Amino acid sequence: MMSEPISTAPESLRTNEAKGAHTASWQRLGILYARVALGSAFLSPVADRFGLWGNHASWGNFVNFTRYVAQVNSFMPAFTIPFLAWAATAAETTLGILLVLGIWPRKVALGSATLLFLFGTAMTISFGIKKPLDYSVFSASAGALLLSLFEVRKSPLNS
Protein backbone atom coordinates (compact mmCIF):
# COMPACT_ATOMS: atom_id res chain seq x y z
CA MET A 1 0.00 0.00 0.00
CA MET A 2 1.48 3.30 -1.18
CA SER A 3 0.83 6.47 0.71
CA GLU A 4 0.42 9.93 -0.72
CA PRO A 5 3.50 12.18 -0.53
CA ILE A 6 3.41 14.42 2.48
CA SER A 7 3.14 18.11 1.67
CA THR A 8 3.21 21.01 4.04
CA ALA A 9 1.20 23.22 1.68
CA PRO A 10 -2.51 22.80 1.15
CA GLU A 11 -3.51 21.53 -2.30
CA SER A 12 -5.12 24.86 -3.27
CA LEU A 13 -1.82 26.66 -2.61
CA ARG A 14 0.14 24.13 -4.70
CA THR A 15 -2.41 24.54 -7.52
CA ASN A 16 -2.14 28.34 -7.37
CA GLU A 17 1.67 28.13 -7.47
CA ALA A 18 1.47 25.93 -10.57
CA LYS A 19 -1.00 28.34 -12.21
CA GLY A 20 1.28 31.26 -11.33
CA ALA A 21 4.30 29.54 -12.87
CA HIS A 22 2.29 28.74 -16.01
CA THR A 23 1.07 32.35 -16.25
CA ALA A 24 4.60 33.68 -15.73
CA SER A 25 5.86 31.47 -18.56
CA TRP A 26 3.18 32.79 -20.92
CA GLN A 27 3.95 36.36 -19.85
CA ARG A 28 7.66 35.89 -20.58
CA LEU A 29 6.80 34.35 -23.95
CA GLY A 30 4.44 37.25 -24.75
CA ILE A 31 7.10 39.80 -23.83
CA LEU A 32 9.68 38.02 -25.97
CA TYR A 33 7.23 37.90 -28.88
CA ALA A 34 6.45 41.63 -28.56
CA ARG A 35 10.13 42.56 -28.30
CA VAL A 36 11.17 40.49 -31.34
CA ALA A 37 8.17 41.64 -33.40
CA LEU A 38 8.80 45.32 -32.64
CA GLY A 39 12.55 44.96 -33.11
CA SER A 40 12.06 43.23 -36.44
CA ALA A 41 9.59 45.91 -37.50
CA PHE A 42 12.39 48.45 -37.02
CA LEU A 43 15.18 46.40 -38.57
CA SER A 44 13.36 45.26 -41.71
CA PRO A 45 12.84 48.74 -43.19
CA VAL A 46 16.43 49.64 -42.29
CA ALA A 47 17.58 46.62 -44.30
CA ASP A 48 15.28 47.77 -47.13
CA ARG A 49 16.79 51.25 -47.34
CA PHE A 50 20.23 49.68 -47.77
CA GLY A 51 19.06 47.29 -50.50
CA LEU A 52 19.20 44.09 -48.41
CA TRP A 53 15.68 42.95 -49.39
CA GLY A 54 16.46 42.80 -53.10
CA ASN A 55 13.36 42.62 -55.31
CA HIS A 56 11.05 42.69 -52.29
CA ALA A 57 11.98 46.26 -51.38
CA SER A 58 9.79 49.26 -50.73
CA TRP A 59 12.59 51.80 -51.19
CA GLY A 60 15.54 49.67 -52.22
CA ASN A 61 18.10 52.37 -51.48
CA PHE A 62 18.74 55.30 -49.20
CA VAL A 63 18.00 57.94 -51.85
CA ASN A 64 14.45 56.64 -52.30
CA PHE A 65 14.04 56.41 -48.53
CA THR A 66 15.17 60.04 -48.16
CA ARG A 67 12.51 61.06 -50.71
CA TYR A 68 9.93 59.23 -48.60
CA VAL A 69 11.16 61.00 -45.46
CA ALA A 70 10.61 64.30 -47.29
CA GLN A 71 7.03 63.26 -48.10
CA VAL A 72 6.28 62.12 -44.54
CA ASN A 73 7.81 65.31 -43.14
CA SER A 74 6.36 67.66 -45.75
CA PHE A 75 5.92 70.30 -43.05
CA MET A 76 9.68 70.38 -42.30
CA PRO A 77 12.24 72.59 -44.09
CA ALA A 78 14.03 70.76 -46.91
CA PHE A 79 17.47 71.15 -45.32
CA THR A 80 16.36 69.00 -42.32
CA ILE A 81 15.37 65.97 -44.42
CA PRO A 82 18.80 64.28 -44.73
CA PHE A 83 19.29 64.64 -40.97
CA LEU A 84 15.82 63.19 -40.29
CA ALA A 85 16.50 60.25 -42.63
CA TRP A 86 19.77 59.40 -40.90
CA ALA A 87 18.36 60.04 -37.41
CA ALA A 88 15.40 57.74 -38.11
CA THR A 89 17.76 55.08 -39.46
CA ALA A 90 20.06 55.31 -36.44
CA ALA A 91 17.12 55.24 -34.01
CA GLU A 92 15.40 52.31 -35.72
CA THR A 93 18.63 50.33 -35.93
CA THR A 94 19.53 50.94 -32.30
CA LEU A 95 16.04 50.32 -30.93
CA GLY A 96 15.56 47.24 -33.13
CA ILE A 97 18.78 45.59 -32.00
CA LEU A 98 18.21 46.43 -28.34
CA LEU A 99 14.63 45.12 -28.45
CA VAL A 100 15.64 41.82 -30.06
CA LEU A 101 18.49 41.36 -27.59
CA GLY A 102 16.36 42.39 -24.60
CA ILE A 103 18.78 45.07 -23.39
CA TRP A 104 17.15 47.74 -21.19
CA PRO A 105 13.73 46.45 -22.30
CA ARG A 106 11.51 48.96 -20.50
CA LYS A 107 13.46 52.08 -21.53
CA VAL A 108 13.96 50.84 -25.09
CA ALA A 109 10.26 49.98 -25.40
CA LEU A 110 9.35 53.47 -24.18
CA GLY A 111 11.74 54.98 -26.74
CA SER A 112 10.15 52.78 -29.40
CA ALA A 113 6.65 53.91 -28.42
CA THR A 114 7.77 57.53 -28.64
CA LEU A 115 9.47 57.12 -32.01
CA LEU A 116 6.46 55.29 -33.47
CA PHE A 117 4.11 57.96 -32.12
CA LEU A 118 6.25 60.64 -33.78
CA PHE A 119 6.24 58.69 -37.07
CA GLY A 120 2.48 58.29 -36.88
CA THR A 121 1.97 61.96 -36.10
CA ALA A 122 4.17 63.04 -39.03
CA MET A 123 2.32 60.64 -41.32
CA THR A 124 -1.01 62.03 -40.12
CA ILE A 125 0.05 65.63 -40.74
CA SER A 126 1.36 64.87 -44.22
CA PHE A 127 -0.99 62.14 -45.49
CA GLY A 128 -4.03 62.15 -43.20
CA ILE A 129 -5.01 59.65 -40.52
CA LYS A 130 -5.64 56.71 -42.86
CA LYS A 131 -1.97 55.98 -43.69
CA PRO A 132 -0.70 55.52 -40.12
CA LEU A 133 -3.79 53.48 -39.31
CA ASP A 134 -3.30 51.28 -42.39
CA TYR A 135 0.33 50.69 -41.42
CA SER A 136 -0.59 50.08 -37.75
CA VAL A 137 1.87 52.72 -36.57
CA PHE A 138 -0.24 53.78 -33.61
CA SER A 139 -1.03 50.14 -32.75
CA ALA A 140 2.68 49.35 -32.68
CA SER A 141 3.30 52.46 -30.58
CA ALA A 142 0.63 51.37 -28.11
CA GLY A 143 2.10 47.85 -27.98
CA ALA A 144 5.55 49.29 -27.30
CA LEU A 145 4.10 51.49 -24.57
CA LEU A 146 2.43 48.50 -22.94
CA LEU A 147 5.70 46.60 -23.18
CA SER A 148 7.49 49.48 -21.46
CA LEU A 149 4.96 49.42 -18.61
CA PHE A 150 5.14 45.69 -18.02
CA GLU A 151 7.33 44.70 -15.14
CA VAL A 152 8.35 41.06 -15.04
CA ARG A 153 7.09 39.77 -11.75
CA LYS A 154 9.29 37.49 -9.78
CA SER A 155 7.67 34.53 -8.18
CA PRO A 156 9.21 32.13 -5.66
CA LEU A 157 9.39 29.63 -8.52
CA ASN A 158 11.65 31.73 -10.78
CA SER A 159 13.71 33.81 -8.37
Image: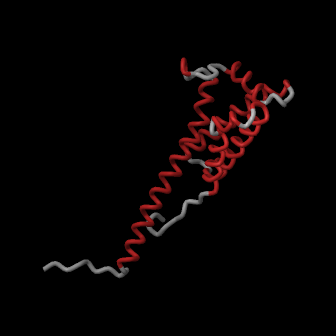
Residue depicted at 79% across the width and 30% down the height: 73
Residue depicted at 38% across the width and 77% down the height: 12
Q: Is residue 153 above or below residue 59?
A: below
Residue depicted at 73% across the width and 29% down the height: 86
Residue depicted at 71% across the width and 33% down the height: 88
Which colour scheme appears in the figure? secondary structure
Which of the 4 image quarters holds residue 93? top right
Quick check: 151 left or right of 10? right
- Quadrant position of the N terminus in the picture: bottom left
The total of numbered circles placed on residues is: 0
Which of the 4 image quarters holds residue 74? top right
Q: Position of residue 130 (x, y in %)?
A: 69, 35
Q: Position of residue 140 (x, y in %)?
A: 62, 43
Q: Position of residue 39 (x, y in %)?
A: 58, 40
Closer to us: 105 or 18: 18
Quick check: 117 left or right of 44? right
Q: Position of residue 108 (x, y in %)?
A: 65, 47
Q: Is residue 149 above or below residue 64?
A: below
Quick check: 119 left or right of 59? right
Residue lying furthest left in this view? 1
